[in-house]
Amino acid sequence: MGAAAAVAAVVIAAGASAYSISEQQTAKADAKKEAKKQEERQNQLLNEARSRGEKEESDAANRSARDQARTRQKALAASATGRRDTILTGPLGLTGGAPETSQKTLLGA
């Protein structure tokens, strides 16, 4: 009986050791999978941040161009006073920028 119990103890110890090694390998594989998922998520967030930054730069450039065009248009409208005997009109009719003098005719009439 003593030999059988010793053999049984060795088999049990070997089985427990094999199980422990298997559990360690499984845990190591799970840790690698989680690390890879985290790395992919981090790369995705970095790409989104870059894309957002590029979009903001593009929007700022568009706003700048739009503001410059608006300023240029306002300057042209302010300097367009016309001749003494004409009234400049726009798509909405008369503009209020030209000074009123006598004997003016409507442009295009």
Image (spheres, rainbow, N blue to C red):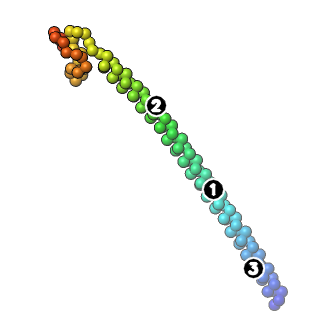
What residue type is disc 2 on? Ala
Residue placed farthest to the bottom in the image? Answer: 1
The residue that label 3 is drawn on is 12
The alpha-carbon separation of the residues under discs 3 and 1 comes to 34 Å
The alpha-carbon separation of the residues under discs 2 and 3 comes to 73 Å
Task: Classify 53 as above or below 17.
Answer: above
For marks 3 and 1, give the one nearer the viewer.
1
Mark 1 Cα-neighbour bin, 10 Å: few <14, some 14–19, many ≥20: few
**SS of the residue at dot 1?**
helix
**The N terminus sits in image quarter:** bottom right
- The answer to which image quadrant residue 64 occupies is top left
Q: Nearer the viewer, residue 23 or 41?
A: 41
- The answer to which image quadrant residue 31 occupies is bottom right
Task: Classify 86 as above or below 68.
Answer: above
What residue type is disc 1 on? Ala
- From the viewer's perspective, is 7 left or right of 26? right
